Image: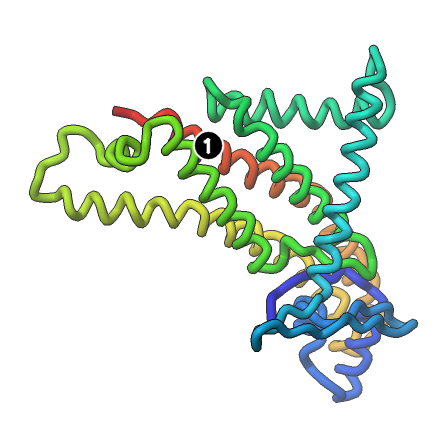
Amino acid sequence: MALNNLPDTLGVAVDTLKTAKGEGSGWILHHVLDSNYIEFDPFGKIYLPHLQLLGMDISITKNVVFMWLIAILLILLLSLVSGKYKRSLIPKGIVNFFEIIVLFVRDEIVKPTIGTGYEKFLPYLLTLFFFILAANLIGLVPYSTTVTGNIAVTAALASISFIAIQLGGIKKHGFFGYFKGLIPPGMPVLILPLIVIVEILGLFTKPFALCIRLFANMIAGHVVIFSLIGLIFILKTIFVAPVSVGFALFIYLLELLVALIQAYIFTMLTALYIGMAVHQEH
């Protein structure tokens, strides 16, 4: 199963009590694995449909449900903001808030890293930033899940970025011109085959790094929170509760900052790689 996060203190408490009683020891994994139900401890669970197509499991899982919710939320919210922005002479309220974010992504991330022709990539990079940020923040809400803590989701995002990077370079330089430009000029013929292999591997290591960086950072914070809360039940003493809860709360608040930083880093690196593909050094 794919990994994900679930910052649900009530669920942690229930499972850690079971662990203390010897009823199980995988309560952390229980909260970081994808599942076919949405849990509302201690109130119950909502089971999701199990589907198959041509022998393949295409079941709707918890991660899928929350990705749909994030997409619907962003479409409705950004459509509302866009409509109000077109009708207002002076942006205010939520419209002004989103304008600040859009201008930040455009002027501080996309424009400096891509340079000339950045406008063509701005819509994709804005979509990427808003989706990752919304997914990270919603994952901090009790009973929700952080879909960016699922390596399948981050791999899909990185794959789309990989396609955008290659298409940007190919459109600018042509198919053969783009891949020819990957090889530094004046390279000795003897080491040319090695350089070609290194450059091809480099094309794939960039999206791989994007995938792992986002996944690891988003899952790590929640695992730490679960571990700190679990100390209360593992040590079986109430005296450790103030320390555990205090540190867990600190990490939880830190996750708010991490949510923004990871959206920024993923978008910035994607824009940087696109800029490198579009403006090759010769």
The percent position of residue 263, horizontal first and vertical second, equals 62, 40
Which amino acid does the dot numbered 1 rest on?
Leu
* Quadrant housing residue 168: top left
The percent position of residue 72, horizontal first and vertical second, equals 77, 46
Q: How many marks?
A: 1
Q: Residue at x 52, y 50 (%)?
A: 213
Q: Secondary structure at mark 1?
A: helix
Residue 184 placement, left or right of 260 = left
Residue 204 placement, left or right of 78 = left
* Quadrant housing residue 3: bottom right
- Circle 1 packing at 10 Å, graded few (<14), some (14-19), many (20+), is many
Quadrant position of the N terminus in the picture: bottom right
Quadrant position of the C terminus in the picture: top left
Q: Residue at x 78, y 76 (%)?
A: 16
Residue 174 vs residue 135, the one in the foreground: 174
Q: Residue at x 71, y 53 (%)?
A: 67
Q: Is residue 25 above or below residue 114?
A: below
Q: Residue furthest front?
A: 54
Q: Is residue 185 above or below residue 68?
A: above
Q: Residue furthest top?
A: 89
Q: Is residue 104 above or below residue 3?
A: above
Q: Residue furthest left?
A: 190
Q: Residue at x 63, y 53 (%)?
A: 148
Residue 277 vs residue 17, the one in the foreground: 277
Can you identify the residue that label 1 sits on?
Answer: 272
* Quadrant housing residue 61: bottom right
The percent position of residue 46, horizontal first and vertical second, equals 84, 71
Q: Is residue 241 above or below residue 161?
A: below
